[in-house]
Amino acid sequence: MTAQFRGGPYDVKSEVVKASRETWADLTPEARSLVGTLWADKTGVDLVLTTLDPVQTKEKILSMIANILEQKKRYPLGRAQTPPR
């Protein structure tokens, strides 16, 4: 995993290396964004939502997810998928 940390600010990388599940809520938005990016690359997911705004509410984030999913129904986004039969 160290090789994946080559880019980016040292303080953010240091924060991520020292982080644990118990301290997730205390991480800076930049550190959570880095974790989300690394996790997306590892798992191959299409979407990870993170925010740099420290006052984003869970309700606002859930609303953004709902809007993205609704748009995806209308307009295929991300990786090409075979339509269901």
Image: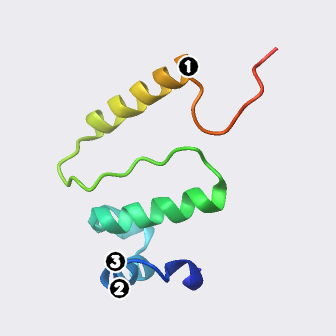
Q: In the rendered image, which quarter contains the N terminus?
A: bottom right
Q: In the rendered image, which quarter contains the C terminus?
A: top right
For the residues labelled 3 and 2, the Cα–Cα distance comes to 5 Å
Residue 58 at what x, y percent from top left? 29, 40
Point out the tag, 1 or 3, that comes first from the N-terminus. 3
Q: Is residue 49 above or below residue 43?
A: above
Tag 3 residue: 12
> For the view shown, which residue lies furthest in the left direction?
55
Tag 2 residue: 10
- Check disc 1: other Cα within 10 Å, few if <14, some if 14-19, many if 20+: few
Tag 1 residue: 73
Residue at the (46%, 65%) spot, across then down: 35
Dot 3: element: helix
Residue 7 at what x, y percent from top left? 45, 79
CB within 8 Å, label 2 to label 1? no
Residue at the (22%, 45%) spot, across then down: 56
For the residues labelled 2 and 1, the Cα–Cα distance comes to 40 Å
Query: In the rendered view, does 77 fall on the left or right side of 82?
Result: left
Residue 65 picture quarter: top left
Q: Amino acid at mark 2?
A: Tyr
Q: Is residue 12 above or below residue 42?
A: below
Residue at the (66%, 39%) spot, across then down: 79
Residue 67 picture quarter: top left
CB within 8 Å, label 3 to label 2? yes
Query: In the rendered view, does 60 fall on the left or right side of 19?
Result: left
> For the view shown, which residue lies furthest in the top direction?
85
Query: In the rendered view, does 18 fall on the left or right side of 39?
Result: left
Dot 2: element: helix
Q: Is residue 78 above or below residue 63?
A: below
